[in-house]
């Protein structure tokens, strides 16, 4: 049995894997990560990942990039490019040549940007997807810089666009921003908690020419990857 | 009279020594600086500019490499020049033209007051041979990349005292290194002084540093010899020649991956896409800005790159 423990900046996830089969998984908020482990959990079977990977019990700690690469292959063995949209950064991993890019310099193209928009409208972030789906029309938003985007959103509301249309526009701007990081490919796997927002997935589908794949429970992928790490390592070159 | 000549990028140090002066590569002071530059694009040029303007660097004149290498230096160099410091501009040929480079070296020689001591060419040549031996040491896993990098990076000016410098390079320890992957660094050297040590902590053995290697690869015994050799300076030439030089070194050193270090607001960052197309290796691009310890986000990239090289098929 192997345990993958992914403790990120906002949530902590655990996955128990037995012979490549998921037997248990759970999500809590990051500061409650201890709830995920029983008092008698054997540290030797835990592989940790995420921002706090070295602060929690582990036999090995791996980066989110490696965890995502392994975890995605669990569901999508022929995956080409992974886009992991996190709260604080977005990572694009090209599995065909082991190359990756991370955007963590500004909030544009990360979950934090959407949070800013939700906060402005005073709505829970989970409802962005639903509002997006209520309209096909989109208010054009050019900026993904958090500060400038808010003023653009205001101008579009003043110009008569509905909140739904502005949210549609926000998602499209967000998707455009991420699309700039994606290399040419015919398939993209989207993972990370932000992908639960169907508005984002929808906008990515509209913008990219590639097939978009969203694995089940996209927020659990890195924990699955961490759990798989111990198995896979024994096949690696070292 | 022996003067200290500031240089803003690679200028044949043998020529400066032969003219009876001592070079001081202003970049070698930048990583240790804690100044906050007033107006900046690239931190390298902004910092040496401010270090000079605030009198923190003891130099008598400045040679600005303004062509074929760094465009920002042309502007920051002029800011220094306006302050009254004697300044000379040096341009590498874009088309690797030997005659053009010869004329540039001739005019630089004029600025430096003419060659007085031909023996220095031979002496520096001997030092560079020692540099090449050091390089071999790390390629053969007999020295830590961080030690070798610290030595090679100083070959641009030999720390303004080649005799002392020779002592230093003679005392680099022989150490068997263990690592998980061999990587190459291309682009400008990282602005973070601990970068090579950090890479080592993640199991990355850096077996090639593009620019520092140029410092020891190029040389000559007179102006004509210098022109013939330095015309191939990878960083100043056309990208096609540069890719050829880099690819040759990558193969020779059997690297598993390539790290392209780029500097915020440096035009060389635009070359990243070209390298990704023409260098067929796992490729990591990192970017730095102001000097200091290697930032955490950058460490994450190095760690992930190391893991990828190690476990991915
Ligand atoms: S990093 Fe680029 S802009 Fe900065 S000094 Fe070097 S070449 Fe010039």
Image (tube, coloured by chain):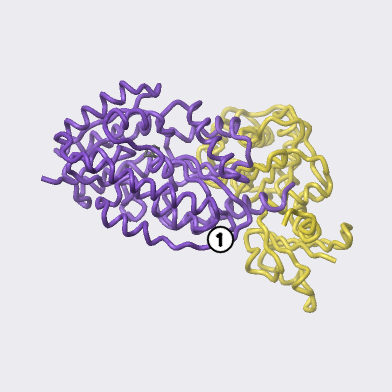
Name the outermost residue toward the left: B1
| Viewer-nearest residue: A91 or B148 | B148
The furthest residue to the bottom: A40
**Viewer can see residue B125:** yes
Is B110 or B188 nearer to us in this picture? B110
Tell how many labels. 1
Q: Is A4 in front, or is B286?
A: B286
Picture quadrant of residue A179: top right
Q: Residue at x 85, y 66 (%)?
A: A1
Ligand 1 shown in quarter: top left
Does residue A150 lie above or below A6 as drawn?
above
Determine whether A2 is above or below B47 in the image.
Answer: below
* Residue A61 x %, y %: 67, 63
From the image, state the color of chain A.
Answer: yellow
Seen at 68% across and 43% down, the residue is A98
Label 1 CA crowd tier, 10 Å (few <14, some 14–19, many 20+): some
Q: Position of residue A52 (x, y in %)?
A: 63, 63
**Relative horizontal placement of residue A8, taking residue B96 as reference (left or right):** right
Does residue A119 appear in this view? no
The reply, left or right, for residue A198 in relation to residue A88 is: right
Tell me the residue that label 1 is attached to.
Answer: B177
Q: Position of residue B196 (x, y in %)?
A: 49, 55
The residue closer to the viewer here, B307 or B159, is B159
Q: Position of residue B305 (x, y in %)?
A: 62, 50
Q: Chain of mark 1?
A: B
Quadrant of image for the N terminus of chain B: top left
Local SS, label 1: loop
Who's purple, chain-wise?
B
Locate residue A44 relative to residue B107 in the image: left or right.
right
For image coordinates 61% across by 48% down, the residue present is A89
Q: Is mark 1 within 8 Å of ligand 1?
A: no
């Amino acid at each position: 049995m192997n345990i993958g423990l992914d403790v990120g900046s906002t949530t902590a996830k655990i996955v128990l894997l037995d012979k490549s089969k998921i037997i248990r998984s759970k999500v809590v908020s990051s500061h409650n990560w201890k709830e995920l482990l029983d008092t008698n959990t054997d540290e030797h079977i835990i592989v940790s990942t995420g921002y706090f990977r070295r602060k929690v019990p582990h036999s090995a700690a791996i980066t989110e990039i490696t965890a995502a690469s392994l975890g995605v292959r669990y569901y999508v063995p022929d995956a080409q490019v992974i886009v992991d949209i996190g709260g604080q950064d977005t990572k694009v991993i090209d599995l065909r040549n082991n190359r990756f890019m991370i955007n963590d310099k500004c909030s544009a193209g990360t979950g934090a940007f959407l949070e800013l928009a939700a906060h402005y409208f005073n709505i829970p972030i989970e409802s962005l997807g639903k509002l997006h789906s209520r309209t096909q029309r989109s208010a054009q938003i050019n900026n993904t810089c958090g500060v400038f985007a808010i003023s653009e959103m205001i101008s579009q509301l003043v110009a008569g666009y509905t909140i739904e249309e502005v949210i549609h526009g926000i998602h499209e701007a967000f998707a455009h921003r991420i699309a700039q990081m994606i290399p040419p490919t015919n398939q993209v796997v989207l993972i990370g908690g932000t992908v639960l927002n169907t508005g984002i997935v929808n906008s990515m589908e509209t913008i990219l020419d590639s097939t978009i794949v969203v694995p089940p429970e996209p927020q659990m992928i890195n924990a699955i990857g961490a759990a798989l790490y111990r198995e896979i390592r024994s096949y690696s070159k070292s | 009279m022996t003067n200290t000549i500031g240089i803003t990028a690679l200028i044949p140090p043998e020529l400066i020594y032969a003219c009876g002066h001592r070079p001081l590569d202003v970049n070698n002071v930048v990583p240790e600086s804690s100044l906050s530059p007033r107006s900046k694009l690239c931190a390298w040029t902004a910092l040496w500019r401010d270090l000079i303007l605030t009198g923190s660097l003891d130099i008598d004149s400045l040679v600005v490499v303004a062509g074929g290498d760094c465009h920002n230096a042309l502007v920051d160099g002029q800011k220094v020049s306006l302050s009254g410091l004697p300044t000379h501009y040096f341009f590498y040929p874009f088309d690797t033209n030997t005659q053009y480079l010869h004329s540039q070296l001739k005019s630089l020689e004029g600025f430096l007051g003419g060659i007085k001591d031909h023996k220095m060419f031979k002496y520096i040549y001997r030092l560079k041979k020692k540099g090449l031996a050091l390089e071999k040491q790390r390629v053969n896993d007999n020295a830590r990349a961080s030690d070798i990098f610290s030595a090679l990076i100083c070959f641009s000016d030999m720390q303004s005292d080649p005799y002392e410098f020779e002592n230093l390079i003679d005392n680099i320890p022989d150490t068997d290194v263990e690592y998980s992957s061999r990587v190459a660094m291309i682009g400008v050297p990282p602005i973070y002084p601990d970068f090579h040590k950090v890479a080592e902590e993640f199991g990355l053995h850096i077996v090639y540093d593009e620019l520092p290697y140029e410092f020891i690869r190029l040389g000559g015994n007179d102006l004509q010899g210098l022109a013939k050799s330095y015309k191939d300076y990878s960083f100043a030439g056309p990208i096609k020649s540069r890719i050829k030089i880099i690819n040759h070194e990558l193969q020779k050193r059997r690297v598993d991956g390539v790290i392209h270090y780029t500097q915020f607001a440096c035009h060389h960052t635009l070359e990243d896409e070209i390298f990704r197309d023409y260098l067929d290796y796992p490729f990591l691009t990192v970017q730095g800005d102001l000097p200091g310890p290697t930032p955490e986000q950058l460490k994450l990239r190095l760690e992930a790159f190391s893991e990828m090289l190690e476990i991915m098929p």
